[in-house]
Image: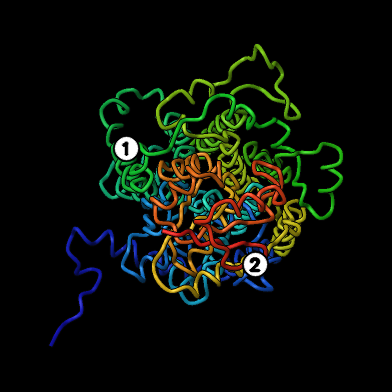
Amino acid sequence: MATQTSPSAASPAHRPIVAAAATVVSVLKRDILVLAWYLLLALWAVSPMLSDPRQKVLGELTDNVHYVYVAGWSAQALFLGKSPFIDPRLNYPDDLALGSNDSPYLSFLLVAPVTLVFGPVAGYNLMIVLSHVLSGYCTYLWARRVTGHQVAAVFAGTAFMLTPFRIFRSLGHANLVSTQMMPLFFWALDNCVSKKDTSEFKLWMLGLAVFLVASSSQYLLIICLVTGALYALGFLLPDLRFILTKGWRIVASVIFGAMIGSLPAISVLSSGLDPFNIGATRLWSADPLNFLLPSSLHPIWGAWVNSMRPEPYATEKTLYVSLVALVVAGLGLAAVWRRSERKRLLVWALTALGAAIFALGTDLWLNNQPLSRSDPFWLPVYYLAKLPLLNIMRVWSRFGIVTILFVALASSFGVRAVLQSIRQTWLKPVLGAALLLVLLIDLMPGTPPASVLQPRPIDRWLAQQTGDFAVALLPVDKPMLNDLAIFGSLFHGKQMPAYLHNAHQPRAYKDFAAMALDFPSADTLQYMRWRKFKYIILDKAQYNGWRAPVWAELAPQLARFPELTYVTEVDGYVVLALRP
């Protein structure tokens, strides 16, 4: 008769893993109400799409469309036995490498069962909700560990979860809303550097945390690595001996996790991820006021703030740290006198300040204008952006999420100090609830826009056409036409030219676009016949004079080419058959 092996009987190599699993289960049972709290907040933040989570997405239809596609293909690939990182149907006649776009691929794979059953929009929406919940909860866990105070930790997790940076990212940037791994990374790093502990288990946990960040976002990975170096030096300096003799173990663990998590991106480094020049990155320098101005989505004073100081790049530059959290964090710093806690808060403050400086970008800007346009004083990012890999970053203001994280974490010390100063036991829960209420008012997510995303009639028409063939959607140089096309491919499975990120178009699509820009012409049609396109589909609405002729001018030209045969028109899309 088989006997069960108890945790205590596990082999020495597996004991830390068994103990960690048991701890996770115990912690989840303990925090069931905390998780429920963050779930309620998450549903509040995404409320506009809850009426139809299978067809509605937050935000206008922009980047969210191709992230829904990635969610859909990740699930389909598992079902079909294909790679979730390569779609053989798109970027015709080559394959489409999904690593060319920064995506939370691990999260999409984890929600794949839901995606397969309820559709790609539902899977994408579930990922957004889980990112909200876990961002708050992981911050809570670390704050609780260092403060030993549950209410204070709930406050910190709430401050990070509801930060407007994250709310705006949920409108379309699935990679950047996936901040749940950031607290885990800094927590694992802290376990190594705060006590100078390079034991095998802690190094493996650090490598795992780095992998989790890399599997969420290459942007967040670079941000964590740069600011993580500041964090580590804040604890380790001036102990140069430890840095030189044992620091390499920490660095090796970080590099290992980063390399494994970044394999999809590494695979396409030589095929389309071109560095950005200063003209493309300088615009995205944050304004110091971006850290102090509330969100324009705030239902009480958002409109007033926006009227006083409009922010045309709100999606990228809303970095509000919460004045409530900032004041409470200041109280925490003033109240902490124990040497270990004070050092931690000072390192947190140093990291937050460093991240804020990086978020200011290449040079100082105010009201979206550089202080000096022709002779600027270059900030550290200007030089950082010249390094390999870092030169593919475009929006440096995103470093502000680290500042937001550490302000939220530091606020837990302030809440603990305030509540511990109260002698009346009955007053503590009342004051704790009051602090949370004030924070919630400060960070009300408002009502972000939502859009319906579903297959177009032309996608359904293509799905009805039997056989495996290639189709070209024109005109080119229309990002939304491309995004809706790749989303539609989830339903009809036909081959077509396509890309994932407009700034990193693959070679095959560039070749196609170079020829298709001249459509209709003899050379264009010769190229398309050579590539064996069966149908050419023209979006009449996009032939509007902007980067394409107006339809009234184009339509008469089509009759000059006998190899083109009119097939049908489906909801504004004209289908032409191309004779072989």
Report whether residue 540 is seen: yes
Q: Which picture quadrant has residue 24? A: bottom left
Which is nearer the eye, 213 or 126?
A: 126
Image location (x, y in percent) of residue 319: 66, 41
Residue designated by label 2: 56
Which is nearer the eye, 203 or 425?
A: 203
Residue mark closest to the camera, 1 vs 2: 2
Label 1: how many Cα within 10 Å (few below 14, some 14–19, many 20+): many
At a point 30% along the width and 45% down the height, the residue shown is 203
Q: Residue furthest bottom?
A: 1
Which is nearer the eye, 352 or 119?
A: 119
Q: Secondary structure at mark 1?
A: helix
| As drawn, 86 above or below 121 | above
Image location (x, y in percent) of residue 21: 34, 65
Residue designated by label 1: 250
For the N terminus, give its image quadrant.
bottom left
At a point 63% along the width and 49% down the height, the residue shown is 557
Q: Is residue 78 left or right of residue 386?
A: left
At a point 44% along the width and 68% down the height, the residue shown is 112
Image location (x, y in percent) of residue 236: 39, 29
Q: Residue furthest top?
A: 375
Image location (x, y in percent) of residue 445: 72, 56
Report whether residue 183 is seen: no
Closer to the chain start, of discs 1 and 2, is 2
For the C terminus, give its image quadrant.
bottom left
Q: How is the image coloured?
A: rainbow
